[in-house]
Amino acid sequence: MQNTKEESNKSYKPPPVVAPAAPPEYFTGNYSSQLVATLESGVSFGSGEYFIDVFIGTPSKHFSLILDTGSDLNWIQCVPCYVCFDQNGPYYDPKDSSSFNNISCHDPRCQFVTSPDPPQPSCKAEENQTCPYFYWYGDSSNTTGDFALETFTVNITKPNGKTELKIVENVMFGCGHWNRGLFHGAAGLLGLGRGPLSFASQLQNLYGHSFSYCFVDRNSNSSVSSKLIFGENKELLSNHNLNFTSFVGGKENTFYYVEIKSIMVGGEVLNIPQETWNLSSEGVGGTIIDSGTTLTYFAEPAYEIIKEAFMKKIKGYAIVESFLPLKPCYNVSGIEEMELPEFGILFSDGAVWDFPVENYFIQIESDDVVCLAILGTPKSALSIIGNYQQQNFHILYDVKKSRLGYAPMKCSQV
C-alpha cells in the first residue's frame, strides 16, 4: 500500500496468498509480519475522512479509498458506472484486470451480502449469474453492483524493518455500478468492520486478529502522515499509557460496540440515564467507535446534558450562534490560552478515556471561534465516537481478546 508507482511496475512478482473464502475464525497461523500503510487526511478534499492508497487488479492500479471501521464491505466504483460520484482518477474497469472474477449467485459467499431491492431474478442453476449486492450507510450513501474477487497488492513490514510486496488473491469486494453519496474524490471504501467481508477480517490469517491506527492532527503539516498497522504491535502493547475497554455485543456485529457508563465534564460525572447507552438485544442503540465518521454523536438526552454542562462551566467568552448545528460556539479572538472544561468518557468496565481539548472543541473561522465537536442523535439511536476525537491516540482493535485499546500518542512519530 505504501509502494510507489515505480515499485508496482517491477517485474518481480511476490508469491500470492489466497484470502479466506470463509469466516476468518477458521484460520490460524504464525503472524510474524506487519502490514503498515500510510493514511492521508481528507481535509484538502473538503472531507473529514481518512484515505488509504490501495493497489488493485493485475496489472495493479492505484485507488484511494476511505478508511471505515463502521462497515465491512470493500468496494470501488466500477465500469460501466451508471450512477457514480466524481472521483480522483479513472474508474476501475474489471476488463483491464486478468485477476478479476465475479462471485456466482450459487457461491456460499454470496450470502454475505444483501441483495438489491427489488430483488434480482432468482438464481438459476443453468446460468452463470453474478451475485448482486446493495449496501446502505447511515447518512443514506449507498452502493449497488456485483460482488466479486480481485487481487490486492500490499506492502508488509517484517520484524527486521525490511519491506516486501505481497499479493493477496481472491479478496472479496464490491464492484459498484450505482453509487451515491459524499465520498469527496475517493474511489470507494475500505471496510475494517467486524464482519467477515472486511479487509481486516480477510487478512486475519496473515496478520492475526488485531490492527491499529494513529491519526495525526488533521491540521498537521502535509509532510507528516497517519498510519494503519495490521498485526501485533509490541511497542504499543508495552506502552504504559495504553488502556483497554471491552467490546460488547456479539461477534456477528459489523460495528465495534463499547459500553459507556457516563460522561465527565470538568471533573463532574454527569447524571445521564443509563438506558441512554444501552444496546438492545435487537441491536438498537449502543455506542460504536468509527474511523469513518468525523464528529462524535451522542443519543439524547445525553447530548443535551453534555452541552448544558459545558455551557454552565464555560465563562468569559462571547457565545456565537452562527455555526449551527455546532453548539455551543465561543469567540476566542485575542485569547492566547483558552480555559475550557476537561472531558472524558467513563466505560461500564471501569475504563476511562480522557481527551485533550483539541479533540472535543474544533477551531473555525481562522481560529477566532471554537465549537463543541459533538452533536446529538435521537433517543435510542446509535452513539458514535468519531475520528476527530481519536486524533493523536493510537487506537488498537484487538478482535481476539474483544477489546479496544487507546493510548495518547504523537501520531506523527509512529
Image: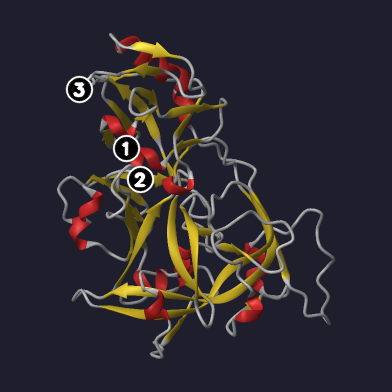
Label 1 belongs to which residue? Answer: 349
Label 3 belongs to which residue? Answer: 337
Relative horizontal placement of residue 176, taking residue 162 as reference (left or right): right
Q: Which of the two residues, 39 or 171, is positioned nearer the viewer here?
A: 39
Q: Which of marks 2 and 3 is nearer the N terminus?
A: 2
Q: Which of the two residues, 198 or 214, is positioned nearer the viewer here?
A: 214
**Rendered view: 272 above or below 312:** below
Label 2 belongs to which residue? Answer: 246
Residue type at tag 3: Glu
State the image coordinates of residue 349 (x, y, percent, origin top left).
32, 37
**SS at badge 2:** strand
State the image coordinates of residue 353 (x, y, percent, origin top left).
28, 36
The picture quadrant where one finds residue 274 is: top left
Q: Do the residues labelled 2 and 1 touch (CB within 8 Å)?
A: yes
- Residue 180 visible at all: yes
Alpha carbon distance from label 1 to label 3: 35 Å
